[in-house]
Image: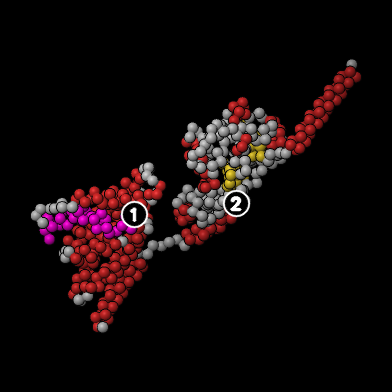
Amino acid sequence: MMNVIFAVLVLGVIAVVFGLVLSVAAKAFEVEVDERLPKIQECLAGANCGGCGYPGCAGCAEAILAGKAPVNACAPAGAEGAAKIAAIMGMEAPSGEKMVAHVTCNGGEAAVKSFEYVGLHDCVAATKVAGGPTACAFGCLGYGTCVAACQFDAIHINEKGVAEVDKEKCTDCGACREVCPRKLIVEVPYKQKVFVNCANKEKGPAVTKVCANSCIACGMCERTCKFDAIHVVNNVAVVDYDKCRNCTMCAKACPRNAIEPIPTPEEKEKFKAAQKAAAERKAAAAKAAAEASAAEAHKAE
Amino acid sequence: MSVTKLLAISLGAILTNNFIFSQFLGICPFLGVSKKSDTAVGMGLAVTFVMGLASAFCFGVNKLLVALGLDYMQTVAFILVVASLVQFIEMFLKKSMPTLYTALGVYLPLITTNCAVLGVVLLNVQNDYNFIGSVVYGITGGLGFLLAIYLFSTVRERLEFADYPKAFEGFPIALITAGLIALAFMGFSGLQVWPM
Protein backbone atom coordinates (compact mmCIF):
# COMPACT_ATOMS: atom_id res chain seq x y z
CA MET A 1 0.00 0.00 0.00
CA MET A 2 2.77 2.37 0.97
CA ASN A 3 4.47 1.57 -2.31
CA VAL A 4 1.45 2.67 -4.28
CA ILE A 5 1.08 5.92 -2.40
CA PHE A 6 4.79 6.59 -2.75
CA ALA A 7 4.67 5.97 -6.51
CA VAL A 8 1.62 8.17 -6.94
CA LEU A 9 3.24 10.91 -4.89
CA VAL A 10 6.53 10.84 -6.78
CA LEU A 11 4.89 10.81 -10.19
CA GLY A 12 2.46 13.48 -9.04
CA VAL A 13 5.33 15.69 -7.95
CA ILE A 14 7.12 15.14 -11.27
CA ALA A 15 3.92 15.98 -13.14
CA VAL A 16 3.34 19.12 -11.08
CA VAL A 17 6.93 20.24 -11.70
CA PHE A 18 6.54 19.73 -15.44
CA GLY A 19 3.18 21.46 -15.35
CA LEU A 20 4.68 24.47 -13.58
CA VAL A 21 7.58 24.61 -16.01
CA LEU A 22 5.17 24.46 -18.92
CA SER A 23 2.89 27.16 -17.56
CA VAL A 24 5.88 29.42 -16.90
CA ALA A 25 7.12 28.66 -20.42
CA ALA A 26 3.69 29.41 -21.85
CA LYS A 27 3.89 32.88 -20.29
CA ALA A 28 7.53 33.40 -21.24
CA PHE A 29 7.13 32.26 -24.81
CA GLU A 30 3.74 33.78 -25.36
CA VAL A 31 3.26 34.92 -28.92
CA GLU A 32 0.93 37.83 -29.28
CA VAL A 33 -1.74 37.14 -31.81
CA ASP A 34 -3.41 40.18 -33.29
CA GLU A 35 -6.99 40.18 -31.98
CA ARG A 36 -8.22 41.25 -35.40
CA LEU A 37 -7.04 37.97 -36.95
CA PRO A 38 -9.87 35.71 -35.72
CA LYS A 39 -12.37 38.49 -36.45
CA ILE A 40 -11.19 38.81 -40.04
CA GLN A 41 -11.28 35.07 -40.46
CA GLU A 42 -14.87 35.06 -39.29
CA CYS A 43 -15.82 37.43 -42.10
CA LEU A 44 -14.29 35.21 -44.77
CA ALA A 45 -16.36 32.57 -46.50
CA GLY A 46 -14.70 29.73 -44.59
CA ALA A 47 -14.80 27.32 -47.50
CA ASN A 48 -11.00 27.13 -47.85
CA CYS A 49 -11.54 27.26 -51.60
CA GLY A 50 -8.14 28.81 -52.31
CA GLY A 51 -9.62 31.27 -54.77
CA CYS A 52 -7.71 34.14 -53.17
CA GLY A 53 -4.39 32.43 -53.84
CA TYR A 54 -3.54 31.89 -50.16
CA PRO A 55 -3.47 28.52 -48.41
CA GLY A 56 -6.96 28.46 -46.93
CA CYS A 57 -8.98 31.11 -45.13
CA ALA A 58 -6.47 31.39 -42.26
CA GLY A 59 -3.71 32.22 -44.73
CA CYS A 60 -5.90 34.81 -46.42
CA ALA A 61 -6.80 36.41 -43.08
CA GLU A 62 -3.12 36.72 -42.20
CA ALA A 63 -2.36 38.25 -45.59
CA ILE A 64 -5.17 40.78 -45.20
CA LEU A 65 -3.92 41.67 -41.72
CA ALA A 66 -0.38 42.09 -43.03
CA GLY A 67 -1.72 44.33 -45.78
CA LYS A 68 -0.51 41.97 -48.46
CA ALA A 69 -4.01 41.20 -49.67
CA PRO A 70 -6.84 43.66 -50.28
CA VAL A 71 -9.83 43.58 -47.92
CA ASN A 72 -11.95 42.18 -50.73
CA ALA A 73 -9.51 39.36 -51.45
CA CYS A 74 -12.20 36.83 -50.55
CA ALA A 75 -14.59 36.76 -53.48
CA PRO A 76 -17.03 34.31 -51.88
CA ALA A 77 -17.49 36.62 -48.87
CA GLY A 78 -18.67 39.26 -51.34
CA ALA A 79 -19.06 42.97 -50.82
CA GLU A 80 -20.66 42.39 -47.43
CA GLY A 81 -17.65 40.48 -46.12
CA ALA A 82 -15.26 43.03 -47.61
CA ALA A 83 -17.14 45.84 -45.86
CA LYS A 84 -16.95 44.04 -42.51
CA ILE A 85 -13.23 43.36 -42.92
CA ALA A 86 -12.67 46.97 -43.95
CA ALA A 87 -14.41 48.06 -40.76
CA ILE A 88 -12.14 45.79 -38.69
CA MET A 89 -9.06 47.07 -40.49
CA GLY A 90 -10.29 50.65 -40.27
CA MET A 91 -10.30 51.13 -44.01
CA GLU A 92 -12.74 52.23 -46.66
CA ALA A 93 -14.53 49.36 -48.33
CA PRO A 94 -13.91 49.33 -52.05
CA SER A 95 -17.21 49.45 -53.86
CA GLY A 96 -16.97 46.66 -56.36
CA GLU A 97 -19.68 45.29 -58.53
CA LYS A 98 -20.69 41.73 -57.78
CA MET A 99 -19.14 39.45 -60.35
CA VAL A 100 -19.98 35.89 -61.30
CA ALA A 101 -18.50 33.23 -63.55
CA HIS A 102 -19.89 32.62 -67.01
CA VAL A 103 -19.23 29.85 -69.55
CA THR A 104 -18.66 31.22 -73.06
CA CYS A 105 -19.83 28.22 -75.02
CA ASN A 106 -23.19 27.23 -76.29
CA GLY A 107 -22.09 24.27 -78.37
CA GLY A 108 -22.87 20.99 -76.66
CA GLU A 109 -25.04 18.91 -78.96
CA ALA A 110 -24.76 21.51 -81.72
CA ALA A 111 -21.00 21.03 -81.88
CA VAL A 112 -19.49 18.45 -84.17
CA LYS A 113 -17.58 15.59 -82.53
CA SER A 114 -14.37 14.62 -84.27
CA PHE A 115 -14.23 11.24 -82.51
CA GLU A 116 -15.88 9.28 -79.72
CA TYR A 117 -13.97 9.76 -76.47
CA VAL A 118 -14.29 6.90 -73.98
CA GLY A 119 -11.52 7.72 -71.52
CA LEU A 120 -11.51 9.23 -68.07
CA HIS A 121 -14.53 11.45 -67.45
CA ASP A 122 -12.51 14.62 -67.12
CA CYS A 123 -12.00 17.60 -69.43
CA VAL A 124 -8.24 17.85 -68.83
CA ALA A 125 -7.81 14.15 -69.63
CA ALA A 126 -10.03 14.53 -72.72
CA THR A 127 -7.97 17.42 -74.10
CA LYS A 128 -4.87 15.23 -73.86
CA VAL A 129 -6.32 12.88 -76.51
CA ALA A 130 -5.70 14.52 -79.89
CA GLY A 131 -6.77 17.89 -78.49
CA GLY A 132 -10.16 16.67 -77.29
CA PRO A 133 -13.18 15.07 -78.92
CA THR A 134 -14.94 18.30 -79.98
CA ALA A 135 -14.10 19.46 -83.49
CA CYS A 136 -14.17 23.01 -82.11
CA ALA A 137 -10.94 23.69 -80.27
CA PHE A 138 -12.64 26.39 -78.19
CA GLY A 139 -15.75 24.49 -77.10
CA CYS A 140 -16.94 23.17 -73.76
CA LEU A 141 -16.16 19.46 -73.45
CA GLY A 142 -18.88 18.85 -70.89
CA TYR A 143 -16.93 16.37 -68.74
CA GLY A 144 -17.43 18.53 -65.70
CA THR A 145 -13.93 19.33 -64.44
CA CYS A 146 -15.36 22.70 -63.43
CA VAL A 147 -18.30 21.01 -61.68
CA ALA A 148 -15.87 19.00 -59.57
CA ALA A 149 -13.81 22.11 -58.81
CA CYS A 150 -16.80 24.14 -57.61
CA GLN A 151 -17.21 24.07 -53.85
CA PHE A 152 -20.49 25.95 -53.94
CA ASP A 153 -22.52 23.65 -56.22
CA ALA A 154 -22.86 26.58 -58.60
CA ILE A 155 -21.83 25.08 -61.92
CA HIS A 156 -23.44 22.13 -63.67
CA ILE A 157 -23.53 20.50 -67.07
CA ASN A 158 -26.87 21.46 -68.61
CA GLU A 159 -29.11 19.35 -70.87
CA LYS A 160 -27.16 20.58 -73.91
CA GLY A 161 -23.97 19.09 -72.53
CA VAL A 162 -22.39 22.44 -71.70
CA ALA A 163 -21.34 23.77 -68.32
CA GLU A 164 -23.67 26.43 -66.98
CA VAL A 165 -23.20 28.69 -63.99
CA ASP A 166 -25.96 29.19 -61.44
CA LYS A 167 -25.30 32.84 -60.81
CA GLU A 168 -27.28 32.92 -57.59
CA LYS A 169 -24.94 30.37 -56.05
CA CYS A 170 -21.75 31.56 -57.75
CA THR A 171 -19.33 33.36 -55.46
CA ASP A 172 -16.76 34.22 -58.11
CA CYS A 173 -14.04 32.29 -56.31
CA GLY A 174 -12.37 31.51 -59.62
CA ALA A 175 -11.89 27.77 -59.07
CA CYS A 176 -13.70 26.83 -62.29
CA ARG A 177 -11.90 29.50 -64.32
CA GLU A 178 -8.65 28.01 -63.08
CA VAL A 179 -9.33 24.37 -63.98
CA CYS A 180 -11.07 24.74 -67.36
CA PRO A 181 -8.51 23.43 -69.86
CA ARG A 182 -10.02 25.57 -72.60
CA LYS A 183 -10.26 28.73 -70.48
CA LEU A 184 -13.91 29.15 -71.43
CA ILE A 185 -15.08 30.50 -68.11
CA VAL A 186 -14.90 34.26 -67.67
CA GLU A 187 -15.75 36.76 -64.98
CA VAL A 188 -18.85 38.84 -65.77
CA PRO A 189 -20.96 41.34 -63.82
CA TYR A 190 -23.86 39.74 -61.96
CA LYS A 191 -26.30 42.21 -63.55
CA GLN A 192 -25.25 41.33 -67.09
CA LYS A 193 -27.85 39.45 -69.14
CA VAL A 194 -26.39 39.49 -72.66
CA PHE A 195 -23.46 37.23 -73.44
CA VAL A 196 -21.76 35.97 -76.56
CA ASN A 197 -21.67 32.26 -75.90
CA CYS A 198 -18.92 31.37 -78.29
CA ALA A 199 -15.17 31.68 -77.99
CA ASN A 200 -14.08 30.32 -81.35
CA LYS A 201 -11.45 32.57 -82.90
CA GLU A 202 -11.40 30.78 -86.28
CA LYS A 203 -12.74 32.47 -89.40
CA GLY A 204 -16.45 32.14 -90.28
CA PRO A 205 -16.37 29.19 -92.71
CA ALA A 206 -14.17 27.09 -90.42
CA VAL A 207 -16.42 27.82 -87.45
CA THR A 208 -19.58 26.95 -89.38
CA LYS A 209 -18.23 23.47 -90.02
CA VAL A 210 -17.65 22.63 -86.36
CA CYS A 211 -20.67 24.09 -84.57
CA ALA A 212 -24.19 25.25 -85.36
CA ASN A 213 -24.34 27.70 -82.45
CA SER A 214 -21.14 29.53 -83.22
CA CYS A 215 -20.11 33.12 -83.78
CA ILE A 216 -19.02 33.56 -87.39
CA ALA A 217 -17.92 37.17 -86.93
CA CYS A 218 -20.51 38.47 -89.42
CA GLY A 219 -20.84 41.73 -87.54
CA MET A 220 -24.64 41.82 -87.46
CA CYS A 221 -24.60 42.43 -83.72
CA GLU A 222 -22.08 45.22 -84.09
CA ARG A 223 -24.29 46.96 -86.66
CA THR A 224 -27.44 46.43 -84.65
CA CYS A 225 -26.12 47.72 -81.33
CA LYS A 226 -27.19 51.29 -80.61
CA PHE A 227 -24.76 51.72 -77.72
CA ASP A 228 -21.48 50.68 -79.37
CA ALA A 229 -21.31 47.87 -76.83
CA ILE A 230 -20.54 44.82 -78.97
CA HIS A 231 -17.58 44.41 -81.27
CA VAL A 232 -16.05 41.63 -83.32
CA VAL A 233 -12.53 41.08 -82.02
CA ASN A 234 -10.36 38.22 -83.31
CA ASN A 235 -13.28 36.75 -85.26
CA VAL A 236 -15.58 36.55 -82.27
CA ALA A 237 -18.10 39.07 -80.94
CA VAL A 238 -17.28 40.52 -77.52
CA VAL A 239 -19.69 42.46 -75.33
CA ASP A 240 -18.39 45.56 -73.57
CA TYR A 241 -20.10 45.10 -70.21
CA ASP A 242 -19.58 48.76 -69.27
CA LYS A 243 -21.56 50.00 -72.24
CA CYS A 244 -24.10 47.20 -72.65
CA ARG A 245 -27.63 48.07 -71.52
CA ASN A 246 -29.00 44.54 -71.91
CA CYS A 247 -31.47 45.53 -74.64
CA THR A 248 -30.94 42.10 -76.30
CA MET A 249 -31.12 43.57 -79.81
CA CYS A 250 -27.87 41.87 -80.77
CA ALA A 251 -29.17 38.51 -79.56
CA LYS A 252 -32.20 38.86 -81.82
CA ALA A 253 -30.09 40.02 -84.75
CA CYS A 254 -27.59 37.15 -84.47
CA PRO A 255 -28.18 34.73 -87.37
CA ARG A 256 -26.48 31.91 -85.45
CA ASN A 257 -28.19 32.19 -82.06
CA ALA A 258 -24.79 32.59 -80.46
CA ILE A 259 -25.82 35.43 -78.19
CA GLU A 260 -27.65 34.87 -74.92
CA PRO A 261 -30.59 35.30 -74.24
CA ILE A 262 -31.38 33.12 -77.24
CA PRO A 263 -34.54 34.50 -78.89
CA THR A 264 -37.52 32.32 -79.80
CA PRO A 265 -38.36 32.04 -83.53
CA GLU A 266 -41.36 34.38 -83.05
CA GLU A 267 -39.20 36.99 -81.45
CA LYS A 268 -36.79 36.71 -84.33
CA GLU A 269 -39.56 37.14 -86.88
CA LYS A 270 -40.90 40.14 -85.01
CA PHE A 271 -37.46 41.65 -84.84
CA LYS A 272 -36.86 41.07 -88.54
CA ALA A 273 -40.23 42.62 -89.44
CA ALA A 274 -39.50 45.62 -87.23
CA GLN A 275 -36.07 46.05 -88.79
CA LYS A 276 -37.60 45.80 -92.24
CA ALA A 277 -40.33 48.33 -91.39
CA ALA A 278 -37.75 50.68 -89.95
CA ALA A 279 -35.61 50.33 -93.06
CA GLU A 280 -38.65 51.01 -95.26
CA ARG A 281 -39.60 54.04 -93.21
CA LYS A 282 -36.08 55.30 -93.47
CA ALA A 283 -36.03 54.76 -97.21
CA ALA A 284 -39.41 56.49 -97.58
CA ALA A 285 -38.23 59.43 -95.50
CA ALA A 286 -35.09 59.71 -97.60
CA LYS A 287 -37.15 59.58 -100.76
CA ALA A 288 -39.50 62.26 -99.49
CA ALA A 289 -36.58 64.46 -98.50
CA ALA A 290 -35.01 64.00 -101.92
CA GLU A 291 -38.30 64.86 -103.59
CA ALA A 292 -38.75 67.92 -101.43
CA SER A 293 -35.28 69.21 -102.24
CA ALA A 294 -35.87 68.50 -105.90
CA ALA A 295 -39.14 70.46 -105.77
CA GLU A 296 -37.40 73.32 -104.02
CA ALA A 297 -34.71 73.36 -106.69
CA HIS A 298 -37.45 73.40 -109.34
CA LYS A 299 -39.18 76.33 -107.64
CA ALA A 300 -35.98 78.33 -107.49
CA GLU A 301 -35.58 77.91 -111.20
CA MET B 1 32.36 5.52 -22.95
CA SER B 2 34.95 5.02 -25.65
CA VAL B 3 34.72 6.47 -29.11
CA THR B 4 34.52 3.00 -30.67
CA LYS B 5 31.57 2.15 -28.39
CA LEU B 6 29.80 5.35 -29.42
CA LEU B 7 30.52 4.59 -33.06
CA ALA B 8 29.09 1.12 -32.58
CA ILE B 9 25.97 2.61 -30.97
CA SER B 10 25.54 5.08 -33.86
CA LEU B 11 26.05 2.48 -36.55
CA GLY B 12 23.62 0.16 -34.80
CA ALA B 13 20.96 2.86 -34.42
CA ILE B 14 21.21 4.07 -38.01
CA LEU B 15 21.73 0.83 -39.93
CA THR B 16 21.75 -2.55 -38.20
CA ASN B 17 19.05 -1.84 -35.63
CA ASN B 18 17.22 0.85 -37.53
CA PHE B 19 14.22 1.96 -35.49
CA ILE B 20 11.79 1.46 -38.30
CA PHE B 21 13.16 -1.34 -40.40
CA SER B 22 14.38 -3.73 -37.75
CA GLN B 23 12.68 -2.65 -34.50
CA PHE B 24 9.40 -1.57 -36.10
CA LEU B 25 8.98 1.46 -33.86
CA GLY B 26 7.40 4.69 -35.07
CA ILE B 27 5.56 3.07 -37.96
CA CYS B 28 2.62 5.47 -37.61
CA PRO B 29 4.39 8.69 -38.64
CA PHE B 30 6.52 6.63 -41.01
CA LEU B 31 3.42 5.68 -42.99
CA GLY B 32 1.50 8.85 -42.31
CA VAL B 33 3.94 11.55 -43.40
CA SER B 34 5.94 9.83 -46.09
CA LYS B 35 3.91 10.85 -49.12
CA LYS B 36 6.20 13.77 -49.95
CA SER B 37 9.93 13.79 -49.38
CA ASP B 38 10.13 17.36 -48.05
CA THR B 39 7.55 16.81 -45.31
CA ALA B 40 9.20 13.46 -44.57
CA VAL B 41 12.53 15.18 -44.00
CA GLY B 42 10.80 17.74 -41.76
CA MET B 43 9.28 14.99 -39.69
CA GLY B 44 12.58 13.11 -39.56
CA LEU B 45 14.46 16.16 -38.30
CA ALA B 46 11.78 16.91 -35.70
CA VAL B 47 11.91 13.32 -34.44
CA THR B 48 15.73 13.41 -34.29
CA PHE B 49 15.58 16.61 -32.25
CA VAL B 50 12.99 15.27 -29.81
CA MET B 51 14.68 11.86 -29.49
CA GLY B 52 17.99 13.49 -28.59
CA LEU B 53 16.44 15.77 -26.00
CA ALA B 54 14.18 13.08 -24.58
CA SER B 55 17.18 10.76 -24.12
CA ALA B 56 18.99 13.45 -22.17
CA PHE B 57 16.02 14.32 -19.94
CA CYS B 58 14.89 10.77 -19.36
CA PHE B 59 18.39 9.82 -18.27
CA GLY B 60 18.00 12.20 -15.35
CA VAL B 61 14.46 11.13 -14.58
CA ASN B 62 15.49 7.47 -14.67
CA LYS B 63 18.29 8.15 -12.19
CA LEU B 64 15.74 9.77 -9.89
CA LEU B 65 13.31 6.85 -10.23
CA VAL B 66 16.04 4.28 -9.56
CA ALA B 67 17.22 6.22 -6.53
CA LEU B 68 13.64 6.19 -5.15
CA GLY B 69 13.22 2.50 -6.01
CA LEU B 70 10.46 3.27 -8.49
CA ASP B 71 12.09 1.97 -11.66
CA TYR B 72 8.96 -0.04 -12.50
CA MET B 73 7.22 3.29 -13.19
CA GLN B 74 9.65 4.11 -16.00
CA THR B 75 7.18 3.86 -18.87
CA VAL B 76 4.62 6.16 -17.26
CA ALA B 77 7.24 8.69 -16.19
CA PHE B 78 8.88 8.68 -19.62
CA ILE B 79 5.57 9.31 -21.37
CA LEU B 80 5.11 12.28 -19.05
CA VAL B 81 8.59 13.59 -19.87
CA VAL B 82 8.22 13.15 -23.63
CA ALA B 83 4.80 14.80 -23.72
CA SER B 84 5.88 17.83 -21.69
CA LEU B 85 9.10 18.09 -23.65
CA VAL B 86 7.27 18.23 -26.96
CA GLN B 87 4.90 20.84 -25.55
CA PHE B 88 7.81 22.90 -24.34
CA ILE B 89 9.63 22.63 -27.66
CA GLU B 90 6.48 23.67 -29.47
CA MET B 91 6.15 26.82 -27.38
CA PHE B 92 9.83 27.58 -27.72
CA LEU B 93 9.82 27.18 -31.49
CA LYS B 94 6.65 29.23 -31.88
CA LYS B 95 8.31 32.11 -30.10
CA SER B 96 11.88 31.98 -31.34
CA MET B 97 11.78 30.13 -34.68
CA PRO B 98 8.36 30.75 -36.28
CA THR B 99 9.59 29.61 -39.70
CA LEU B 100 10.64 26.20 -38.40
CA TYR B 101 7.43 26.05 -36.36
CA THR B 102 5.22 26.56 -39.41
CA ALA B 103 7.36 24.17 -41.46
CA LEU B 104 6.92 21.38 -38.92
CA GLY B 105 3.27 22.25 -38.43
CA VAL B 106 1.17 19.43 -37.08
CA TYR B 107 4.05 16.94 -36.96
CA LEU B 108 5.51 18.45 -33.84
CA PRO B 109 2.58 17.61 -31.53
CA LEU B 110 2.30 14.25 -33.31
CA ILE B 111 5.73 13.27 -32.00
CA THR B 112 4.24 13.16 -28.49
CA THR B 113 2.63 9.86 -29.40
CA ASN B 114 5.55 8.53 -31.41
CA CYS B 115 6.62 5.16 -30.01
CA ALA B 116 10.12 5.55 -31.46
CA VAL B 117 10.72 8.35 -28.93
CA LEU B 118 9.45 6.29 -26.03
CA GLY B 119 11.32 3.30 -27.44
CA VAL B 120 14.66 5.07 -27.48
CA VAL B 121 14.43 6.14 -23.84
CA LEU B 122 13.38 2.67 -22.71
CA LEU B 123 16.17 1.07 -24.74
CA ASN B 124 18.65 3.49 -23.16
CA VAL B 125 17.68 2.09 -19.77
CA GLN B 126 17.64 -1.50 -20.99
CA ASN B 127 21.10 -1.19 -22.55
CA ASP B 128 22.39 0.63 -19.49
CA TYR B 129 23.92 3.50 -21.49
CA ASN B 130 25.49 6.41 -19.65
CA PHE B 131 24.50 10.03 -20.35
CA ILE B 132 26.62 10.53 -23.49
CA GLY B 133 25.72 7.09 -24.77
CA SER B 134 22.01 7.82 -24.27
CA VAL B 135 22.14 11.12 -26.12
CA VAL B 136 24.18 9.63 -28.97
CA TYR B 137 21.77 6.71 -29.21
CA GLY B 138 18.81 9.13 -29.24
CA ILE B 139 20.22 11.37 -31.95
CA THR B 140 21.51 8.56 -34.16
CA GLY B 141 18.25 6.67 -33.68
CA GLY B 142 16.50 9.80 -34.96
CA LEU B 143 18.90 9.98 -37.88
CA GLY B 144 18.07 6.34 -38.65
CA PHE B 145 14.40 7.32 -38.62
CA LEU B 146 15.18 10.24 -40.93
CA LEU B 147 17.06 7.95 -43.32
CA ALA B 148 14.24 5.41 -43.33
CA ILE B 149 11.41 7.90 -43.83
CA TYR B 150 13.32 9.78 -46.53
CA LEU B 151 14.15 6.62 -48.50
CA PHE B 152 10.57 5.44 -48.17
CA SER B 153 9.09 8.80 -49.21
CA THR B 154 11.18 8.93 -52.37
CA VAL B 155 9.98 5.45 -53.29
CA ARG B 156 6.40 6.46 -52.54
CA GLU B 157 6.70 9.53 -54.74
CA ARG B 158 7.63 7.23 -57.57
CA LEU B 159 4.80 4.85 -56.72
CA GLU B 160 2.37 7.63 -57.68
CA PHE B 161 3.20 6.92 -61.30
CA ALA B 162 3.69 3.17 -61.02
CA ASP B 163 1.33 0.70 -62.58
CA TYR B 164 0.13 -1.74 -59.90
CA PRO B 165 -3.21 -3.47 -59.33
CA LYS B 166 -5.95 -1.17 -58.07
CA ALA B 167 -6.49 -3.31 -54.97
CA PHE B 168 -3.01 -2.33 -53.77
CA GLU B 169 -3.67 1.39 -53.97
CA GLY B 170 -2.71 3.43 -50.91
CA PHE B 171 -1.55 1.64 -47.78
CA PRO B 172 -1.24 -1.94 -49.12
CA ILE B 173 1.42 -0.99 -51.65
CA ALA B 174 3.08 1.28 -49.07
CA LEU B 175 3.29 -1.60 -46.58
CA ILE B 176 4.70 -3.95 -49.21
CA THR B 177 7.28 -1.31 -50.12
CA ALA B 178 8.17 -0.84 -46.46
CA GLY B 179 8.58 -4.60 -46.11
CA LEU B 180 10.90 -4.74 -49.09
CA ILE B 181 13.05 -1.89 -47.78
CA ALA B 182 13.14 -3.65 -44.40
CA LEU B 183 14.38 -6.79 -46.16
CA ALA B 184 17.08 -4.71 -47.82
CA PHE B 185 18.08 -3.36 -44.42
CA MET B 186 18.56 -6.95 -43.26
CA GLY B 187 21.71 -6.78 -45.34
CA PHE B 188 23.23 -4.55 -42.65
CA SER B 189 22.78 -7.13 -39.89
CA GLY B 190 26.12 -8.51 -38.76
CA LEU B 191 27.81 -5.21 -39.50
CA GLN B 192 30.20 -4.60 -36.60
CA VAL B 193 32.70 -2.06 -35.45
CA TRP B 194 35.76 -3.91 -34.33
CA PRO B 195 36.61 -4.29 -31.50
CA MET B 196 33.23 -4.20 -29.77
Which quarter of the rendered picture does the N terminus of chain A lie within? bottom left
Q: CA distance from mark 1 to mark 2?
A: 40 Å
> Residue most toward the top?
A301
Circle 1 residues within 10 Å: few <14, some 14–19, many ≥20: some
Is label 1 on the same chain as label 2?
A: no
Residue A65 shows in the view? no
Q: Is residue A284 magenta?
A: no
Q: Residue at x 24, y 48 (%)?
A: B184
- Report whether A135 appears left or right of A220: left
Q: Disc 1 marks which residue?
A: B31
> Are discs 1 and 2 less than 8 Å apart at CB?
no
Q: Residue at x 60, y 46 (%)?
A: A165
Q: Disc 2 marks which residue?
A: A169
At label 2, the amino acid type is Lys
Q: Residue at x 31, y 74 (%)?
A: A16
Q: Select label 1 or label 2 by which is in front.
A: 1
Q: Report x, y in % for residue A172.
A: 56, 48
Q: Is residue B24 magenta?
A: yes
- Residue A158's disc is none
> Residue most toward the right?
A299
Q: Main secondary structure of the magenta part?
A: helix
Residue numbers of the magenta segment: B1-30
Picture layout, residue A268 above or below residue A46: above
- Report whether B28 appears left or right of A286: left
Viewer-proximal residue, B175 or A25?
Answer: B175
Given the image, what chain letter belongs to the residue carrying mark 2? A
- SS for tag 2? loop
- Report whether A41 appears left or right of B129: right
